[in-house]
Image: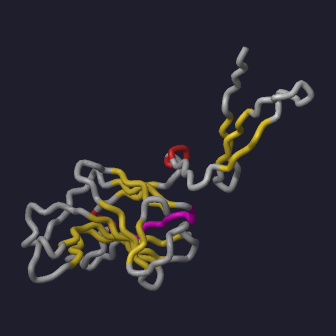
């Protein structure tokens, strides 16, 4: 008769995940309850954390643009941590002249002394998970780990115009930009 046992998945406070594999005895002297624990390498389990992330909602109050009435745009306050959810569901982007019918295609995050990270924009998607797992470092930036208290970040949404789209230049055109202070 073949004995079967379930696999057990467990994690620790460091975000590491392990799987417990039952080991089967080949001798009568060995206990049948021996197990082997295997660490899962390069395994990310983000789903359980997403609901805990703070939300940044894109709006005109935080749009960093000069205002006719002289008022100052608001700055987002973000707690230190692994990331945030970027919600664009209630916002209509102001697309500059010359780029009509060219929707956003890129989210950029700039931290510190010019470390730039990018996340692709997807048409029809309104909420983005912005974490070290989803941000791609650019121009020699170190891999993103987490948001640290005291840093100021620039968050931009716009269109990357490639050489294929423009014979004149390659550039990022900003449709919306906001500032974030991490506390």
Q: Is 103 above or below relative to 169?
A: above
Residue 30, how many percent across, how many down? Answer: 89, 30
Residue 40, how many percent across, how many down? Answer: 62, 49
| Residue 80 drawn in magenta | yes
For the point 65% across and 48% down, which residue is it? 17
For the point 73% across and 33% down, which residue is it? 22
Observer-nearest residue: 113 or 36? 36
Observer-nearest residue: 17 or 173? 17
Left or right of residue 39, residue 170 in this image: left
Quadrant in which the C terminus appears: bottom right
Observer-nearest residue: 141 or 52? 141
Q: Tell how many labels.
A: 0
Q: Is residue 18 visible?
A: yes
- Which of the colour schemes (rainbow, by chain, secondary structure, one colour) is used? secondary structure
Left or right of residue 98, residue 18 in this image: right
Q: Is 14 above or below relative to 141?
A: above
Residue most extreme to the top? 1
For the point 43% across and 59% down, which residue is it? 134
Q: Quadrant of residue 26?
A: top right
Q: Which span of residues is magenta-colored?
A: 75-81
Left or right of residue 143, residue 7 in this image: right
Residue 104, how many percent across, how many down? Answer: 22, 62
| Residue 88 drawn in magenta | no
Left or right of residue 24, residue 152 in this image: left
Quadrant in which the N terminus appears: top right
Residue 70, how many percent across, how many down? Answer: 26, 79
Q: Is residue 69 visible?
A: no
Q: Quadrant of residue 69?
A: bottom left
Q: Is 93 above or below relative to 45?
A: below
């Amino acid at each position: 008769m073949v004995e079967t046992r379930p696999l057990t998945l467990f994690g620790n406070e460091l975000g590491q995940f392990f799987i417990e594999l039952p080991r089967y005895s080949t001798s009568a002297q060995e206990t049948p309850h021996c197990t082997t624990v295997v660490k899962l390498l390069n395994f990310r389990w983000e789903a359980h954390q997403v609901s805990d992330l703070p939300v940044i909602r894109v709006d005109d109050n935080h749009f960093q643009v000069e205002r006719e009435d002289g008022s100052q745009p608001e700055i987002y306050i973000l707690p230190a941590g692994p990331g945030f959810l970027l919600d664009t569901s209630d916002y209509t982007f102001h697309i500059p002249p010359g780029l009509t019918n060219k929707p956003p295609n890129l989210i950029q995050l700039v931290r510190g002394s010019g470390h730039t990270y990018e996340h692709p924009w997807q048409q029809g998607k309104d909420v983005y998970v912005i974490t070290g797992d989803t941000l791609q470092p650019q121009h020699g930036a170190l891999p993103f780990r987490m948001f640290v208290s005291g840093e100021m970040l620039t968050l931009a949404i716009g269109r990357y115009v490639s050489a294929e789209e423009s014979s004149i230049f390659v550039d990022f055109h900003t449709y919306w930009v906001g500032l974030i202070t991490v506390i």
